[in-house]
Image (cartoon, helix red, strand yellow):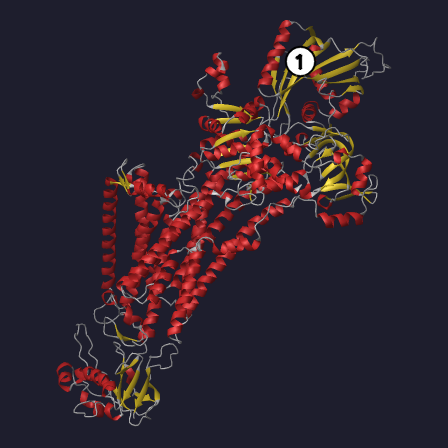
Amino acid sequence: MGEKTPRIYSVELNGAKDMEQTDKGDDKKYRSLRENCLELGKNHHKEELRKEVDLDDHKLSNKELENKYHTNIITGLSSTQAAELLARDGPNTLSPPKETPEIIKFLKQMVGGFSILLWVGAILCWIAYGIQYSNDKSSSVDNVYLGTVLALVVILTGIFAYYQEAKSTNIIASFSKMSPQQALVIRDSEKKIIPAEKLVVGDIVEIKGGDQIPADIRLLFAQGCKVDNSSLTGESEPQPRSCEFTHNNPLETKNIGFYSTTCLEGTATGMVINTGDRTIIGQIASLASGVGNEKTPIATEIEHFVHIVAGVAVSIGVLFFIIAVSMKYHVLDSIIFLIGIIVANVPEGLLATVTVTLSLTAKRMAKKNCLVKNLEAVETLGSTSIICSDKTGTLTQNRMTVAHLWFDNQIFVADTSEDHSKQTFDQSSGTWASLSKIIALCNRAEFRPGQESVPIMKRVVVGDASETALLKFSEVVLGDVMDIRKRNHKVAEIPFNSTNKFQLSIHETDNTTDKRFLMVMKGAPEKVLEKCSTIMVNGQEQPLDKSTAEAFHTAYMELGGLGERVLGFCHLYLPADKFPETYSFDVDTMNFPMSNLCFVGLLSMIDPPRSTVPDAVTKCRNAGIKVIMVTGDHPITAKAIAKSVGIISANSETVEDIAKRLHIPVEQVNKQDAKAAVVTGMELKDMSVDQLDEVLTSYSEIVFARTSPQQKLIIVEGCQRQDAVVAVTGDGVNDSPALKKADIGIAMGIAGSDAAKNTADMVLLDDNFASIVTGVEEGRLIFDNLKKTIAYTLTKNIAELCPFLIYIIIGIPLPIGTITILFIDLGTDIVPSIALAYEKAESDIMNRKPRHKKKDRLVNKQLALYSYLHIGLMQSLGAFLVYFTVYAQEGFRPSILINLRVEWEQDSVNNLEDSYGQEWTHYQRKYLEWTGYTAYFVGIMVQQIADLIIRKTRRNSIFQQGLFRNKVIWVAIASQIIIALILSYGLGSVTALNFTMLQPQYWFVAVPHAILIWVYDEVRKLFIRLYPGSWWDKNMYY
Amino acid sequence: MVIQKEKKSCGQVVEEWKEFVWNPRTHQFMGRTGTSWAFILLFYLVFYGFLTAMFTLTMWVMLQTVSDHTPKYQDRLATPGLMIRPKTENLDVIVNVSDTESWDQHVQKLNKFLEPYNDSIQAQKNDACRPGRYYEQPDNGVLNYPKRACQFNRTQLGDCSGIGDPTHYGYSTGQPCVFIKMNRVINFYAGANQSMNVTCVGKVNYTQPLVAVKFLNVTPNVEVNVECRINAANIATDDERDKFAGRVAFKLRINKT
């Protein structure tokens, strides 16, 4: 099979532009195959796929199979045999898509983002020490120490980020283990229930309606077995299964059941012929995982941000390195300045903070039924501009429900909401009595026993979708249907088949005075009407004349136009003289009348939309998100559902609608008048790339109907060409390439196949479209809040950087040390930047357009300038004020500090004079320098509190937002102060940390500057609100 | 900085940069029009002007809290440091008796250092005070400035005064004088009214506030590590980290051939 796999793959992914990177080894073959495919055209997908399946077990007889797999159909495998095979073939599970080895993931964290810069810093430290050491064996180990600290910072933040990632991945792992699949298997002549993953080739398994087929099986015995192959082929119709070999192609033949498809009804026994990744589904799924994974928007944004900051750091570093060298500084000193500048510029804690923020949101979303697999996907939903949604199950309830009835020349509406317990239409008419009887009797579906306490709509039914709908409907309206059927004993029955298109049964009635048999029939309305000569109106039989026939047609067309499946119902009381109680009915010879029946009514069914969906679609629309429906269903049904949920809004028309209204041919319609479009898979197949692009751009409301899962990929790519961020929902295995290709793939938690869940970035636990909207909201909020976090973090970088620049240029004693900077970045600032993630939205984030992937950046020019050149600078001034205060009050006035650096730092100068003529030893100065560090640190900390408060909002006043709404902010402020107090007073005596006990009053020196920052930012926001669109707004709003 | 995923030709990149620097369609220079540049420059001028004013104001207010004559805090100067004269780079006094050049610089330094201690200058600038008492000049409500120090006459240094000294502070004979001085700390009451002295590993010739140490018989051609410390009630000399708090260590080597 291996050699042929790329062929299947190419079929799967035809149309994907960036597949080249998938499989290097098979590249050549792959290309030629791809060309081959293109020649064949898109409509050959399925045929291609089918041709490639290398399987001949369906052609073998039972005996041959037994020999081939060394098994016995009656007794099954022996346990020892099974154990051997299990050891040989491995468990029967799809191996998850190739994961990056943990060590690679870990190393990526170690070198990603700013880590490289910090490594460079650390290595420079060690080099500097090396040079120092070679000159002077007794040189201080400060640089080794600093290098080690930097390396530790990288390693620790790396471990932390890795741990966060791993934790969020675990959520999904535990989720997929929640429902272990069981299989009923015959081994050692005994029936056993074992976990499906323990199945091996040759096992004999039994399946029944409702089960998932646990492996690829060759059917040996089947009774009324139907399977749903939609996850494999996209065909939504149930397919019958038997044990006969009916087709050369294993995908077509009836005697093979595929892994992960569902048995809808009936029972079957089969022999396992393939397990795990060797199953058809397994092959497709593992190949689909090769589609190029799109980089998440937030990853792009963070990369952009890292580039900006690293660019600033490196250019300032190099610039000042050159300045320092040309100012005749020693090269070694210049290197040390360079390290200081890098450390000051890099927000060491920020990436870890971002990870925490994202995982907090992921947790919040999990509570709202959105399980996020990839942390970065949390934000992707927020920037989503197009959602390609499935219809069945996502937009709809995924169950047929009676929607309308027509009798007595009147259409009645039935309640289709999720939990309808009673029907409110008029039930007094005699016609209804007859119709309800037909509905109840002419039905083969049954409730599984033992569900009396379960609400009717939730009970499990054995039977097909329509019959289930009818059974539940009649159970709700009439009460105990089983009892009615018991009282009206069934004497003969013709089940529904596609040639007859009707279903018929004959019953003894529960009316003891009337001994006539009742014949009831339901089926395709036109077929049923053919057999009728009368029609029941208000309980009275009337001859079926032209006008009533017309009324019937009008009603039929109307209901059909709603996309509903319509059934006609008729009955006939067989005359007692011709059909006495002992009459023996023979369904093969049809010894009963099949004409001149009495037509009773029509009933239509639909898979109704979920009640929360229309609201959610409106929300999406307000949020500027285009919702596109992609379904395998019929265009009329698709359009009807699209209309009822608002994907096609009430007042918009398609080209066809306009043509119909104006009575002109479709070609003459001005396409610009139409807002909506319904495109079928057939049309899509003939479209060129440009035509598809045109459809996607010119219509705001689009429904794709009758599409194959493969076409989904083409649609997704079309959307991505419009620079849209595309979310795709899907459940089938064949959806996985589209899910992977999408910017965010959303799999259905209930209906979704494992393959889909594996490739998706997110899993909707309740399969509900409305949950996506909550996801969008959270995603947008996190984007806003990340902006705030980054703005907060970047601000203090300037305050950390300025000391080095001033130190180099005017030669004052160093205001803040590298270690102290690390204590801000990884100490006092961590909790506050996380706290901003808890900030509530400033305005209704669901009322604005999704951000443009390339224009609305996370870190834009305004944010960088405002943080660096406005608030950052103010903060530096405040911190310098504290620094100068400490020095002045200890004896060094600002004027004397200038150009003091060389003497200040010289070991041998132990009588340096201050402004008062007092003389200082080297260590006394050193201690004062540390006091200066502490003072500068406290200055930054105090102003960062103000910074934290102003960052709560970007446009609104703090008072509009509420100072106390986000309690976490206050926890953060408390943490900042407590950490600073501990550092100064608790660890002030630990020399290595360079902190000292600061006089209490110095803690308040920067407060005026902090207040100034707040006032300035309030003024900025006020002008932004007052003059939207003005010069100020453009330059000051980040 | 940003690495573009789509490969652009070199020409395109240059073209884009050109357009960024000067866009003739929109008349934009570096992404801004002339008016926009004027606005932004004006804004930053005003803004930074304001910040400078604000900073200057706060610094001025801060400096008002600092007295001109006595520092506000002296907590770092509890123990005054000691220093030696002649002061050399690594605090090592190396004398080649025969090589005049080697000690001449020390002598020059000492001459210069001791100049203010000449008796005439001392009498002119400082007051003669009673020995054994602190010479306090309290402000008593009125600022008493400049304060005058006690006289310390060069002649008090005896053999090491260098006055009429043919041995050049003993350097020419291999018996060099090294002066030990205590760092000045305002309002520091050295010795806290008790007698204090300086002990060195070696001979001590004690006077206040300069202490001249004359090394009378140093083993020649050997490096001698000398540590001197002040012995006083209120001066701790055992600070592990500060090697100059109340003590001073230096190397002495006299080379004789």
Residue depicted at x 67% and y 43%: A277
Indicate whether A401 appears above or below B115.
above
Indicate whether A97 appears above or below A323.
above
Q: Please state the horizontal and vertical placement of residue A569, each as a whole percent of the image.
A: 69, 16
Q: In which quarter of the image is residue A1004?
A: bottom left
Q: Please state the horizontal and vertical placement of residue A236, each as a whole percent of the image.
A: 64, 28
Q: Please state the horizontal and vertical placement of residue A490, each as a whole percent of the image.
A: 80, 20
Left or right relative to A1021: residue A558: right
Secondary element at tag 1: helix
For the N terminus of chain A, the image quarter is top right
Q: Please, which residue is most extreme toward the right here?
A: A582
Give the residue type at disc 1.
Answer: Glu
Q: In which quarter of the image is residue B56?
A: bottom left
Is residue A293 visible from the viewing direction of this image?
yes
Residue depicted at x 32% and y 45%: A1018
Q: Give the camera-side residue of A917 and A922.
A: A922
Left or right relative to A761: residue A242: right
Left or right relative to A915: residue A481: right
Q: Alpha-carbon neighbours of circle 1 within 10 Å: few (<14), some, or many (≥20)?
A: some
Q: Give the camera-side residue of A948 and A767.
A: A767
Left or right relative to B246: residue A594: right
Q: Give the camera-side residue of A72 and A8.
A: A8
Indicate whether A867 appears above or below A683.
below
Is residue A956 visible from the viewing direction of this image?
no
Q: Please state the horizontal and vertical placement of residue A325, each as a whole percent of the image.
A: 30, 63
Q: Name the residue under label 1.
A: A526
Chain for numbered disc 1: A
